[in-house]
Image: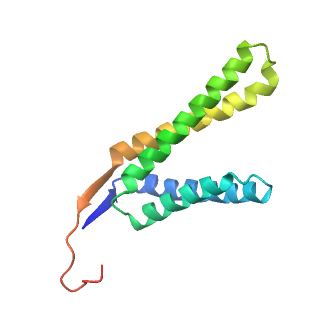
Amino acid sequence: MKKVVFKNDMFYSILIIFLSILIVWNIYALTTGRFIAVISILIQSILLILVITRHEKTKIGITVWTVWIMIGASFGLLGKFMKLFLGDEMGPLLEGILENIILLLIAYVFYSYNKSSVRIEFVEKDKDNKAM
């Protein structure tokens, strides 16, 4: 049986806290009428379950999730810069640019920690505990 091992317990804890905060944030967004938040809630909930259970697919799940966030933030930055170069005012765009940069950096940090401190190990079942 394969299990995920987190070499860095702080990364494990921060990942669980961050995913939980995102789920709560998206539930709030859902209550304000942003029905697209259902997709985020579903993906983040699945990833949170994978992380907590230390499922063997956790590492690839975190990788896909962080790459997806980096792609989205990059497209957001590209769109904001295009609007800026087409003549929109800097003031209203600055907040969106900063949000996308912060999101891109956070996703990259999670990606690099996932790559360096999460590994998949083969764990043998105990003879006494066959239900595992």
Locate residue 87 relative to residue 38 in the image: left or right. Answer: right
Task: Farthest residue to the bottom: give it.
Answer: 128
Q: Residue at x 61, y 58 (%)?
A: 41
**Residue 89, x across and y down, in percent:** 81, 18
The chosen color scheme is rainbow
The N terminus sits in image quarter:
bottom left
* Up/down of 78 relative to 3, above or below: above
The C terminus sits in image quarter:
bottom left
Q: Residue at x 60, y 29 (%)?
A: 75
Residue 132 showing in the rendered view = yes
Q: Residue at x 54, y 55 (%)?
A: 43
Q: Residue at x 30, y 63 (%)?
A: 3
Locate residue 123 relative to residue 79 in the image: left or right. Answer: left
**Residue 113, x across and y down, in percent:** 41, 44
Q: Which image quadrant for residue 128?
A: bottom left
Residue 8 showing in the rendered view = no
**Residue situated in front as seen by the camera: 65 or 129:** 65
**Residue situated in front as seen by the camera: 28 or 35:** 35
* Up/down of 12 relative to 124, above or below: above
Locate residue 51 relative to residue 97 in the image: left or right. Answer: left
How many numbered marks are there? 0
Q: Which image quadrant for residue 122?
A: bottom left
Q: Which image quadrant for residue 130?
A: bottom left
* Up/down of 102 relative to 5, above or below: above
Locate residue 89 relative to residue 70 in the image: left or right. Answer: right
**Residue 32, x across and y down, in percent:** 80, 55
**Residue 30, x across and y down, in percent:** 73, 57
